[in-house]
Amino acid sequence: MSPPVGPRTALDTILKRERWHGRGGSWVADAIYGANDGLGAVFGIVSGVAGATNNQQHYVLISGLAGMLASTLSMGAGAYLAAKSEAEVYEAEISRERAEVEENPEEEIEEMALFYQLQGFDVEESERMARRLAEQPEQFVQAMAQSELGLSEHRFPNPWTSATSAAVSTAIGAFVPIIPFFFMSGLPAVIASFGISLIAHFIVGAVKSLITIRSWWISGLEMTWIGVIVAAVTYTLGLAFGALA
């Protein structure tokens, strides 16, 4: 006969089966949004500079590579700080809630009981549940934080993992619009960049459906249309700036 399984172990087992929990906060999300940001930003830069310089290859390459580097560093630093700040804010709020429980436990128990009443439990049952929960101080603090502040206990992403994922994916996405300009110049390079960038936009949008509930082709088409708009606007502005120069 197998030994009894504790509630925490049983819950962890169930959550592992329900893989969609926490998928949005994983490195996959950082990678998808990093690729999206890098592709969109540098696609816009390449289109604008091409329009402003009459499609001159070396100007587009220099600006595109500079944009790729800037986007990569920015996304990596942003993902690192976001992950680190999220954990720090959570810990700070939990510490404040813990201090309140320690300073005035009866008031916090009464508050927890009121939250239970709002969920449909009667007064006596709510009081009993709140006092029972208060016998486990750390669980009580977590429950109060969730009810009062909307904070849920979860595993925060490693800041370095988030930064690496976001930076690498941004660099890959940003490099795509530049590729044709290594091998061709003029209008053919612009057209080739436009074509492969739109394909990349569709792929990124389709992959984004992994962390959403949207259809992959709708998500892909949405990203593609965004890419078309970005290219049209930036290329037109580039032509206007080039005419003024």
Image (cartoon, rainbow, N blue to C red):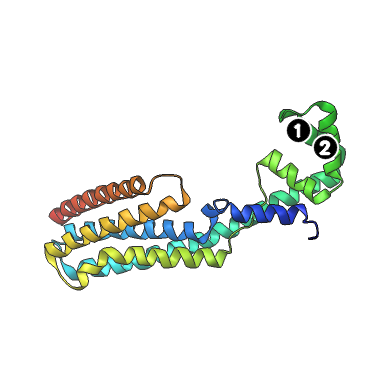
Quadrant into which the C terminus falls: bottom left
Is residue 155 placed above or below 137 in the rendered structure? Answer: below
Task: Please tell me which of labels 2 and 1 falls first in the chain.
Answer: 1
- The reply to whether residue 140 is visible in this rendering is yes
Which residue carries the number 1 mark? 116
Q: Position of residue 234 (x, y in %)?
A: 24, 52
Label 2 – label 1 distance at C-alpha:
8 Å
Q: Is residue 123 left or right of residue 183?
A: right
Taking the spot 80% from the left edge, 44% from the top edge, the residue there is 100
Mark 2–mark 1 contact, CB under 8 Å? yes
Judge the density around disc 1: few (<14), some (14-19), many (≥20) Cα neighbours within 10 Å: some
- Dot 1 amino acid type: Tyr
Is residue 221 placed above or below 9 in the rendered structure? Answer: above
The residue sitting at the bottom extreme is 183
- Dot 2 amino acid type: Met
* Residue 130 lies in quadrant: top right
Quadrant into which the N terminus falls: bottom right
Q: Nearer the viewer, residue 182 or 23?
A: 23
Q: Nearer the viewer, residue 120 or 79?
A: 120
Taking the spot 72% from the left edge, 50% from the top edge, the residue there is 94
Q: Position of residue 134 (x, y in %)?
A: 84, 43
Taking the spot 22% from the left edge, 66% from the top edge, the residue there is 60
Which residue carries the number 2 mark? 129
* Residue 194 lies in quadrant: bottom left
Q: Is residue 47 left or right of residue 105?
A: left
Q: Position of residue 47 (x, y in %)?
A: 22, 57
**Local secondary structure at mark 1:** helix
Judge the density around disc 2: few (<14), some (14-19), many (≥20) Cα neighbours within 10 Å: some
Q: Position of residue 80 (x, y in %)?
A: 53, 62
